[in-house]
Amino acid sequence: MTDFLGIYFPEFFYVLCGLVCFLTAFRARKNDSARVGTMLFWTLTGIIFAFGKLLPSAMVGGMLVVMGCLTVTRQVKMGKFKESTLQFRKISSEKIGTKIFVPAVAVGLIALILSFVKYDVVKDGVAVPTALNGAIMTGVACVIALILGIVICKPQMSETREDTSRLLMQVGAACLLPQLLGALGSVFSEAGVGEVISGMISAVVPRGNIVIGVIVYVAGMVVFTMIMGNAFAAFTVITAGIGVPFVIAQGGNPAVIGVLGMTAGYCGTLMTPMAANFNIVPCAVLETKDPKWSVIRAQVPMALIMIVVHVILMLVLGF
């Protein structure tokens, strides 16, 4: 049971992601331009998702380099898709109404419920309660949301396949940025970047000053998240380099400091184009005039306010 929940079951959802990529690669054969490059890109993406666990790391790295070259040389393009008529969209909107939001809400709600599910993992003869793998929580929630969407919208399968490929092509290579940045965080952590940052900060910021320590920690999470585009990637590096020696070691509650440090990072997420899943993908889907900065400009004022709020909350609740 432990191996099933921890190893095999999560891979099922990665295989599903791979199948979607293969479907998009097959659809790319109809592209007018960059047909080969687009097909190759989505085929490689599908292979990595579906079989990445079985492939040598060097092979996966080489495939990512090829995908990067295809993207840089603009060999990954969105094909032409048949647009639905305005009348059809209006009729569908009136028919479905606000029920269209049910699947989206279901994803977050079901994932939240599953986060409370625990199963025992035996370590050194002792049963340790363990949460479900994140891929399981998200994957199960998305599958249930898909079923709800089919029940509510009753689409034709041909339309579903076409729209799935259209959406993935519309987002393009940006859909892989969160995974790559998350991996980069692990690389930085293993390389000891946190220790380097700690040494640099120690030369400027005196230990023992709680207020300055908190401000530097929050600012570090914000800036590093803006650079990496992912608060999870920044958290391990900045918490090890700044949070632990300059905040927690001064008497801060590790649980409170850690939680607020993570959410402080998301203030940086609101202000960077590197956070593709937040700031670039929505612009691509909504086809905004300024796909890079329109969402960010709207979010910056609130992000700056929340940075100050995080500093205050960390000082009040963390000590």
Image (cartoon, rainbow, N blue to C red):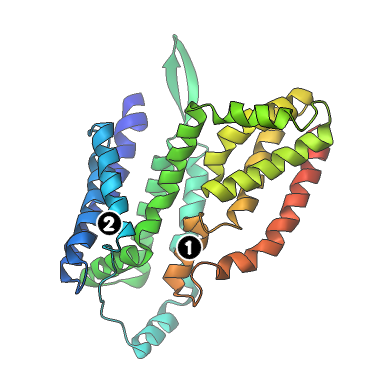
Task: Check the image and name the residue furthest to the bottom.
Answer: 87
Label 1 neighbourhood size at 10 Å, few (<14), some (14-19), many (20+)?
many
**In the rendered view, does 301 fall on the left or right side of 283?**
right
Q: Residue at x 42, y 51 (%)?
A: 177
Q: CA distance from mark 1 to mark 2?
A: 19 Å
Q: Amino acid at mark 1?
A: Ile
| Residue under pointer 1 | 280
SS at mark 1?
Answer: helix
Q: Marks 1 and 2: CB-CB under 8 Å?
A: no
Instruction: Give the x, y percent position of residue 6.
Output: 37, 30
Q: Amino acid at mark 2?
A: Leu
Q: Nearer the viewer, residue 306 or 12?
A: 306
Instruction: Give the x, y percent position of residue 74.
Output: 30, 64
Q: Residue at x 48, y 27 (%)?
A: 190
The answer to whether any part of residue 201 appears in the image is yes
| Residue under pointer 2 | 70
**Quarter of the image where the C terminus is located:** top right
